[in-house]
Structures are given as structure tokens and as C-alpha cells.
Amino acid sequence: MKEQLRQIEETAVAAISSCTDLRALDELRVKFLGKKGELTAILKQMGKLSAEERPAMGQLANQVRAALETAVSEKSAALQEAAKAAKIAAESIDVTMPGKRPAVGRLHPLQIVENEIKEIFLGMGFSVADGPEVEYDYYNFEALNLPPNHPARDTQDTFYITENILLRTQTSSVQVHVMENQKPPIRVIAPGRVYRSDAVDATHSPLFHQIEGLVVDKGITMADLKGTLELLMQRLYGDDCKIRLRPHHFPFTEPSAEVDVMCFNCHGEGCRVCKGEGYIELLGAGMVHPKVLEGCGIDSEVYSGFAFGLGLERIVMRRYNISDMRLLFENDMRFLEQFR
Ligand code: DAH
């Protein structure tokens, strides 16, 4: 029996010391020290020994057990230490590697200019109004003095959803919502998307953006309109910028005007950009038609107002020298990344 114990100790110690991973080590522990292990099997035979032999053999068995347990736990600690070291080595960071630049978004050029125009008007005491893009015919046309069959409807090729629901063709529709819900004094701008059934080309898109303006109060005159728009253009294009009003017709204003802005390129001299004119047509405006005021419950004997509508794309294209409107809607990153 003594021989057997020595034998077990020798093979177990050798196996444990040459063991290279924790799982195999645990298998060895079970094999030698477990309940059904080799050492236990021998101890079970102790009963067969004589009373004199038993204590010495018991002591030896305990020594062997202790020796094996120490060997297992030392080996286990060593293997864990090695595994940790290997993990640390594998995870080491190379601080000299070039970093990955996080992609930071930026504003679309349309949004940049819209924000700028909003700021200018907020500075003049305007607030920003909003209205639906899917609109009743009434708000888009009828309340703006464009009854059914009015020929001017033809100039705004419309996407109809039903007979009397459509995608708004102009932000002028917001004027009506504002006047229905608010009593004068009114000073609002209404930026937003508008839609027309136009074919796409370098200067047309079925979706584009307008900014509407509306002021209604006692004693508002065309001078207020001109002063307001001139200040806007001077903020956008520089303090020497002048504007020019040309008579025009819009059903919802009387009188109406088209507003030309001094050419930013030649400052009125006449050049290639303005085709020799010195001025560039930029927006529509006028004094709110009494019928429109009355239709919204505002007494046109007491109040007067002016309104204007400008196309955002035009201003953006001029500002950034963009020659094709499609670039604004194609969302090509190479294009969009150029603006801040
Ligand atoms: N809604 C007009 C358009 O889309 C632009 C416009 C002209 C708006 C005159 C106005 C205005 O408010 O007074 O062509």
C-alpha cells in the first residue's frame, strides 16, 4: 500500500507539473483527489490493515493528499497568472495608431440660410409661424382671393390629393391660418416646404422652400414693406444693398410688386450675373388685399398689412454660387460637406 501511495504521488505530481491549462488541471484533481479518485480508492482499503499498520499508513496518505493539494493549487495559481498575462498582452493598445475621426453632421445649406433669415426677422420683432403642407384648397387658394377657375391658379401646377385637399403650392396659405387665429398687430414669418407639379431641371424642383412674411396693424403702408425688405437684404448682402419694386399682380395683394435686389456681383453696374440689369428679381410682395383681410375677420377699414414671399433656393444658390438646384436635394455628401 505504501508503494501504491508513493506511486500515485509520483505520477500525480508529474502530471500536475506538466499540465498547461486549467481545465486539464481540474480533471487531474478529480482523477487523483476526487471522491472516486485513486487516492480515495486506496484509503478505502485502510480497513483491511492491522491496527499497528493503520496510523503510519494514515499519516502517509494524509501527507500524499496534502502534497497533491498543494501541487494543484500552486499550479492553478500559476496558470491563472499566465492566462491573465496573455490577455493583457493581447489587449494592449497601440497609442500610435491613427484615430478614427467621428463623423459630425452639419446643417444643410438651405437650413443655414433659413436660420439666418429667421434671426434677422426675430431681430425685427417677428415671430415664426407654421402651417400644414397638406392643405385645403381654401387656405392655399380661395381665402387668398383665388376662387375656383381663377386663371392665376394655372401658374401654380398643383398636386391634388382630393378635389379640395392638395399639397400647398405657396406658404401664403399660412397667412390665412395666422389671421384666423390671431388679432392684429401681427408680425410673422412662415418658412416651409411647398410643392408644385414641375419637372425637375437645374432651376425647378417639385419640392422647394418659401419664406412668407405678414405684417398687419393700423397704418401699415408700402413704406413699411420696402423698409423691412431693404433691411433684410442689407443684412443678407451688405449694407450698401438696395432694392427696387416693380409693379406686378398677385391676387392676394393690392398693389402688388416684384422685388428686385441690387446685384451682389456688380453692385448695380450691370454684369454677366444680372444680365446687364444691375438688379436681380428675388421675391413677390404687396399690400394685403382687403378681401383677404375681411375673409379672415379683420376690418380692412381699420387695419392694413403687407405680405411677401421669397424662394429660399434662389437665395441659397446665389449665396453659394450653386448653378444647379438638384444639388440641394440629391444629398451627395461631397456636396453637402462643403457648407458650415
Ligand atoms: N405666394 C407667391 C408665390 O408663390 C409669392 C408671394 C407674392 C407671396 C406676393 C406674398 C406676396 O405674400 O404678397 O409666387
Image (tube, rainbow, N blue to C red):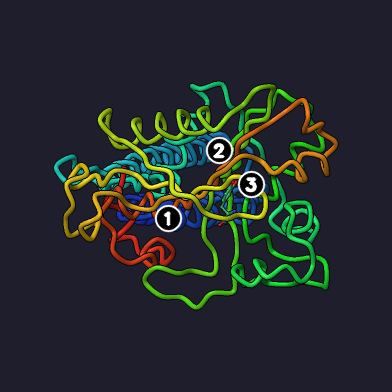
* 1 vs 3, front mark: 3
Q: Earlier in the sequence, mark 1 or mark 3?
A: 3
Whether the residue carrying mark 1 lies under 8 Å from ligand 1 is answered with: no
* 2 vs 1, front mark: 1
Q: Earlier in the sequence, mark 2 or mark 1?
A: 2
Residue 170 versus residue 333: which sits nearer the camera?
A: 170
Quadrant assignment, res 301: top right
Q: Position of residue 306 (x, y in %)?
A: 60, 36
* 2 vs 3, front mark: 3
**Residue at the disc numbered 1:** 313
Rendered residue at 29%/37% (across/down): 237
Residue 141 versus residue 152: which sits nearer the camera?
A: 152
Numbered circle sitting on residue 253 = 3
- Left or right side of 57 for 275: left
Q: Residues within 10 Å of mark 2 (few under 14, many from 20)?
A: few
Numbered circle sitting on residue 263 = none
Q: Residues within 10 Å of mark 1 (few under 14, many from 20)?
A: many
Q: Position of residue 333 (x, y in %)?
A: 33, 60
**Residue at the disc numbered 2:** 58
Query: SS of the residue at dot 2?
Result: helix
Instruction: Quote the CA–CA distance across marks 2 and 3.
Output: 115 Å
Q: Amino acid at mark 3?
A: Thr
Residue 269 versus residue 228: which sits nearer the camera?
A: 269
Does 102 sit above or below residue 223? Answer: below
Rendered residue at 68%/30% (across/down): 216
- Left or right side of 316 for 45: right
Rendered residue at 65%/33% (across/down): 305
Instruction: Quote the CA–CA distance across marks 1 and 3.
Output: 23 Å
